Image (cartoon, grey):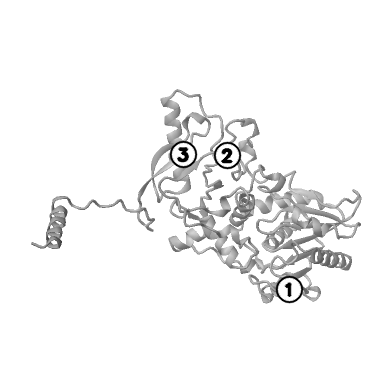
């Protein structure tokens, strides 16, 4: 018998005697089908119970997950006869990958599947080093820092408004700068340095970035608008007040301007917007499929959309290696990534009711002519929201979506135009 044939017979006999073991299937989320997965979690108030394991369903909502985790924490406390929990966990915040899982979008409950959470991942029910901070969150190791339960509603933020110029205290003309998606107040310093010395310049120093890394963030866009309006109303009671807002900040400026007039009887002299479409052009998030929901909820997909869409996002934010390394999680990029994630979520409420209503102040728009994300026709539609369409104009500038950032020449050009417009109105 040829050896090759004998070898084949032996292999056939081996296969007959020892059936092939089935390999463990790799987990894949299936829409509409619930699967059990094992998650890691930490006790919020004891380092002795880190990396506990528990079984959960991948179709659970954020609140269901929080309830289950807290029941596991209470079970551990009872088993080991620990003291009662000190922190306030009533807001049901759950942290994953250092950001907070938002419970819903436009009334739809989000699930673990939507966030791409898989077996072996780790979640927390309290904040930790470099994580996103939230309004009314627990402070397990220092409960005195917690916001009281009766102060959970929107309130004035004493650290929100930051003055950037070095002028005197008696200036009656003021310009308030609204940041863009992931932007910080310091990004406007080069512009303010070129502004006229008789104009006071303020910027919104939003939580979760810069010097306010540990400040409580706002859970929704409407919540943020109410806080901003409360804070600005106190400063805008006197003098002539103008607002400049770039990119996504334009929508916040629009809603805040409306709220200032309706709730606080404060009128803005003029609104200056830059490189963004009108508020009622915002399209509600498509939540029809699991893929669409993951595009809204998974950070890497969020950054990929911003990079490919021409929004001026650092391309490194969307990098993932074949070994699973994601650049946005690095020490270098995480501070920017965190602020982008925060602002991404607080814009998901838009458009708010009444987004098509005209303001009671004139509007002037700026436009970087090389913008790949926003068209000139989109910016021109701000004319219909101005109280005086005859005074509306689009000032075209050189550059793309972030046309004045990192360019001293364009920052000076913006400062010059703002000074001219302030004198005009």
| Label 2 vs 1, first from the N-terminus | 2
Look at 91% across and 57% down and name the residue there: 198
Which numbered disc covers residue 41?
A: 3
Q: Residues within 10 Å of mark 2 (few under 14, many from 20)?
A: few
Res 65 seen here: yes
Find residue 317 and report its horizontal and vertical position in percent: 59, 57
Are discs 2 and 1 less than 8 Å apart at CB?
Answer: no
Q: Which residue is mark 2?
A: 128
Q: Is residue 183 left or right of residue 162?
A: left
Whether residue 365 is situated above or below residue 73 in the rendered picture: below
Give the image quarter of residue 362: bottom right
Whether residue 136 is situated above or below residue 245 in the rendered picture: above
Give the image quarter of residue 257: bottom right
Q: Nearer the viewer, residue 152 or 122?
A: 122
Quadrant of the image containing the N terminus: bottom left
Find residue 178 and report its horizontal and vertical position in percent: 73, 57
Q: Nearer the viewer, residue 77 or 331?
A: 331
Find residue 179 and report its horizontal and vertical position in percent: 71, 57
Look at 75% across and 65% down and name the residue there: 404
Find residue 75 and report its horizontal and vertical position in percent: 42, 30
Which numbered disc covers residue 100?
A: none
Q: Which residue is mark 1?
A: 383
């Amino acid at each position: 018998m040829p050896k090759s044939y004998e070898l084949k017979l032996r292999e056939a006999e081996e296969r007959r005697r020892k059936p092939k073991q089935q390999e463990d299937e790799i987990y894949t989320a299936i829409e509409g089908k619930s699967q059990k997965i094992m998650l890691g979690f930490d006790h919020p108030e004891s380092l002795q119970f880190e990396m506990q394991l528990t079984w959960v369903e991948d179709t659970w909502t954020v609140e269901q997950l929080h309830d289950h985790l807290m029941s596991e924490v209470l079970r551990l406390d009872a088993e080991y006869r620990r003291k009662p929990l000190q922190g306030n966990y009533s807001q049901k915040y759950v942290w994953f990958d250092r950001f907070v899982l938002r419970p819903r979008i436009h009334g739809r409950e989000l699930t673990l599947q939507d966030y791409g959470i898989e077996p072996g991942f780790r979640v927390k029910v309290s904040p930790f080093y470099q994580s996103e901070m939230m309004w009314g969150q627990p402070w397990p190791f220092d409960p005195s820092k917690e916001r009281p339960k009766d102060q959970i509603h929107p309130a004035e933020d004493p650290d929100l408004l930051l003055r950037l110029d070095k002028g005197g205290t008696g200036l009656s003309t003021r310009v308030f700068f609204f940041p863009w998606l992931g932007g910080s107040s310091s990004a406007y310093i080069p512009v303010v340095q070129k502004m006229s010395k008789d104009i006071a310049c303020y910027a919104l120093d939003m939580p979760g970035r810069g010097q306010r890394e540990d400040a409580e963030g706002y859970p929704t866009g409407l919540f943020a608008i109410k806080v901003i309006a409360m804070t600005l109303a106190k400063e805008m009671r006197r003098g002539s007040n103008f607002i400049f807002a770039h990119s996504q900040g334009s929508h916040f400026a629009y809603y805040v301007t409306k709220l200032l007039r309706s709730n606080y009887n404060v009128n803005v002299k003029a609104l200056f917007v830059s490189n963004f479409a009108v508020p009622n052009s915002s399209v509600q998030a498509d939540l029809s499929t699991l893929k669409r929901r993951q595009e809204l909820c998974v950070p890497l997909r969020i950054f990929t959309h911003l990079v490919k869409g021409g929004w001026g996002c650092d391309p490194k934010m969307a990098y993932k290696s074949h070994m699973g390394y994601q650049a946005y999680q690095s020490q270098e990029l995480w501070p920017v990534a965190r602020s982008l994630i925060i602002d991404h979520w607080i814009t998901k409420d838009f458009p708010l009711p009444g987004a098509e209503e005209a303001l009671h102040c004139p509007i002037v728009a700026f436009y970087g002519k090389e913008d790949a994300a926003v068209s000139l026709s989109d910016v021109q539609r701000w004319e219909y929201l101005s109280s005086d369409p005859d005074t509306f104009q689009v000032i075209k500038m050189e550059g793309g979506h972030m046309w004045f950032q990192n360019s001293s020449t364009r920052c000076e050009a913006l400062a010059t135009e703002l000074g001219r417009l302030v004198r005009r109105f």
